[in-house]
Image: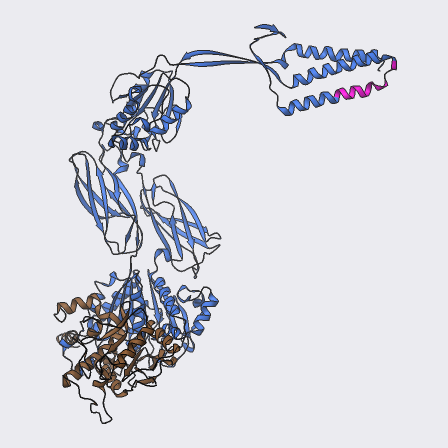
Amino acid sequence: MDDPTRRELIRDALRVAAMLGAGAASLGGPAWALGPGSQFGIAELLLDQGTTSRPEAWKRLLFEVIQSTSVECDPTPVSLSPEDPLLFAHPFSVLVGTGSLPELSDAAVEQLVRYLSYGGFLLIDDASGNPGGPFLRSVQALTTRLFPTRPLSPLPGDHSIFRAFFLLDRPVGRTANATALQGISIGPTTPLVYCADDLSGALDRGPDGRDHYPVVPGGEWQRREALKLGVNLVLYALTSNYKHDTAHVLELMREGRLE
Amino acid sequence: MSTWLWTTLDPAGHLAWTSSDAVVSLAVAGAVLAWVAAVWTSRGLPVGATSLRVASLALWALALGTLAAALSGPSWVEERGRSEPGKVVVLVDGSASMGVLEGAAPRSAAVAEILKRIGPDAELLTFDEDIHAGAPDPNSPDAWTGRGTDVGLALSAVADRYLGQQLRGVVLITDGLDRGALRRELAAASDAGQALAGAVPALPGPLTIYQVGQADDLYDVAIDGVINGGFAFLRTDFRLTARVRGPAGLTLPVTLSREGRTLRTKQVKLGEDGRGKVSFDVRPTKVGRFAYMLSVPVDDADAVPGNNSYPVVIRVVRDRTRVLQVSGSPSYDQKFMRLFLKEDPSVDLVSFFILRTREDMGAGWRSDELSLIAFPYERLFSEDLDSFDLVILQNFDYKPYFDRSADELLGNIANYVRDGGALLMTGGDRSFDLAGYGETPLAAVLPVALGVTGVRSDPTPFRPVLTDAGRVHPVTRLGASPAESEAIWERLPKQDGFNEVVGLAPDSAALLEHPSARSRTGKAPILAVREVGKGRSMALMVDASWRWSFSEAAVGRGNQAYLRFWKNSLRWLMGDPEDQRVVITPARENVLLGDSVRVVIKVHDAGYLPVDGAVVRGTVTPPSGRAQSFEAVTDASGEASIEVAAKEQGAHRIRASSPGVPGRGETVFAVSDRDPELVEIVPDGVFLQRLAAAYGARAVYRPPGDPAGPTLDASAGREVLDRRVIDLASVPLVGLLFGLLAGGAWITRRRAGAR
């Protein structure tokens, strides 16, 4: 028979660790969905120009999600074009931009509208190093075509993205110029988010495993915050405004972690 | 006046024909034919007898004409008028309130003395909601049974009946408890300072109003009414407020009970006006119809024991469906499920997602960096459990959290289902046998049998297929017809794999199954449902139902299939009384003792279409517990009806089922001897005084005990018409005349040479 005190300690440890449980994985063996298709994955959207592929950044993010959360992930990102029907096999997608984007076809726009309206999530990451430059203008033109009545707007500081897993004060990436993420909200959810600070740049690594870019101005602390933002974006894409549920807000306020 | 035809006729009279047109026509036609026959047979008479022949035919014509005239009903009508004194019409209130006891005698006892004062020649009429001749026995309280006293109707009936006449007087004997519109109208006009005369009908004589009954002689405590909305929301307080009446200053206990079980008692002190209010807040925990009763004690001296209790049937409905979604890890399936539940305004969702497992705790993050909170599993699955309509365990492994209390907490969930709750378990690597649920109390309420050893899931993509039950079940009905539903299921995208189970649990049905994989009970079930006790459970052995939404949207078909599937599932899992396959509806929810009530039982098939010819068997259980069985057969509209006699006071619960149709219908109606006529029994002298005032000088109000007789108009008289009708056909001279004429004609014809 187990020592009750010891069991209580274990249970308290689980609870005080401020997380919701220990999951099936703790019972032995890795956690797998019933099939690989239901694991969380990342699809990079690539266009003919203006976009770049950073698979190592996304592998790093997925690794962190696997290490820190209970989300079951396919650790290898895929690359797709916006017209590709396989897009609907990947409800989480990213588009990393370096410059002006070409105009998307009507078919691509139509597919993206359906994708975002029915549960897909798109992170647009500005890697141009030129806030307010041609890439942002292309993104604004694209979002206007996608949702003519819903302009790209700053997300409030208490948006669920900032508390989906980690408690964050502001968004940062390789740079830290913007004070807010921008996004398009449909009802209570935000299926499209624009990050102006090159999030993927902070996560990207070279073949040797070293960070590809220096992070300014916060250095490694900022890179860590960027990684937390990436994890939060994944968790937000899966749990939506879960962290705005009354039970969570009241408990976090009671513990002084939220004001 | 003269003597004629051996009878006396008044020359001022007039002749009238009384036979019907048909008889007159037949008489004339017969006479003409007879005369033509006489002409025809006289052709052979000798030529020299022409004058005799003409005389004979003339006499025949006169004789036949006399006969036809006699058959046409000639009558002599004489009319003559004369004057008599006007009538006295007495209107006696025959309602049940006149029979209540005041001291030792019924209120109606005063009626006999008043009638004696009026005299025997008066025309007596009794009124309640109608008017009829005569009056009940004043000394027999049981004879006063009328309902719906309508003083205005009675006065209008007198005005119409004696229109154009003069009455010596109209006498109204009543306690003033008018249930018609007149009392309200006079009160409203009085309050508004308006003239009252326009509210009352003009009467053909002076009105004397005798009030019978006095409040001082009456002891009656009653619940005059209960303020309620008729329905309440599940798990939300609703208020029942009783209006209590009785002697001023009295303190009374008021008891609230539900279907014979006392819930609470409160004291209420009546004010100087003898009235008081007391409220009870009630929080219903189940949907359906429930009979509540508010009552005050019955004293031996109570004039009307029947109004001491007040039954109320409350329909409890769901305002919102409260759903607990517990997910073992964030996933696409959990995401789409949450989006679906969150977007439904009728759903009140409480979600708990396990965001981090024990293995993830080594990642090096400090607790204060995280937004995670403790999982309040003990509270959720014990004290809070009954607050939910549906519990969803979505790929959730209980073991790391429930620890020593696993059997207790999972047993709570199992009992919650048996007691009427709903449970949905969906697949994944932390669900069914992969989480070891087969060894827990929860296995007993799942629709699938657990206990698979070895390989417990299959990651091979497959497309589920409908079973025979799935083709008609409301959960899997995605289209307008079974064929359309099947076509939709056939085109939906494949699933990523499935949880293997031993097979179907007893009394369960598989709605979707694997196209090839087998279990011990047949094809491997993919979606199964079960009715357990009063609750329902569902098992979906896949973790990619989200593809039914997203992949459909990919090809421009939206997410209707996904939404419809889960909406159907929610509705079925709730199993609300109105969504049952057998639905019972009483025509009335509050029934008077001794009356009968019609109850309709409707039977639906799996697709919720009416079932023709279904046998319905059920019971009606009165408070005594002596249940009466009934059996009926539904018609083409799926309905069967029965008449239930209300022989006992209290809640009557009706339960019915139909062989082969899952589930059971249930409802309730309340029976009381609360006669609406006796809800208010204190005489209303104010109304009667207002009524007298409305007639001005033409009416007088006599309070109880006033010995004065009625006000009569001695000059009122009436013309009485005497009428005499003499049947002329029956006087002897008519027969003699016909005999002479016919005989003369026969003799003349013989003399003319006829043989």
Q: How many marks?
A: 0
The answer to whether A81 is drawn above or below residue B186 in the figure is below
Q: In the picture, which quadrant includes the C terminus of chain B?
A: top right
Residue B125 magenta-drawn? no
Chosen colour scheme: by chain
Residue B17 falls in image quadrant: top right
Residue A59's spot in the image, x, y percent? 26, 86
Residue A172's spot in the image, x, y percent? 18, 80
Residue A110's spot in the image, x, y percent? 38, 75
The answer to whether A200 is drawn above or below residue B223 in the figure is below
Residue B500's spot in the image, x, y percent? 36, 77
Residue B36 magenta-drawn? yes
Q: Relative to residue B254, is residue B593 drawn left or right?
A: right
Q: Which residues are magenta?
A: B34-47
Identify which residue, B188 or A74, lies in the foreground. Answer: B188
Q: Which chain gets the brown colouring?
A: A
Residue B670 falls in image quadrant: top left
Q: Main secondary structure of the magenta part?
A: helix
* Residue sticking out furthest to the bottom: A208
* Residue sticking out furthest to the top: B2
* Residue sticking out furthest to the right: B47
Identify which residue, B289 or B463, lies in the foreground. Answer: B463
User: Is residue B595 among what the camera can see?
Assistant: yes
- What residue is drawn where x is 22% and y is 94%? A208
| The hue in which chain B appears in the rendered picture of the protein | blue
User: Is residue B541 among what the camera can see?
Assistant: no
Q: Relative to residue B451, is residue B363 drawn left or right?
A: left
Identify which residue, B411 or B9, lies in the foreground. Answer: B9
Q: Relative to residue B372, is residue B476 drawn left or right?
A: right
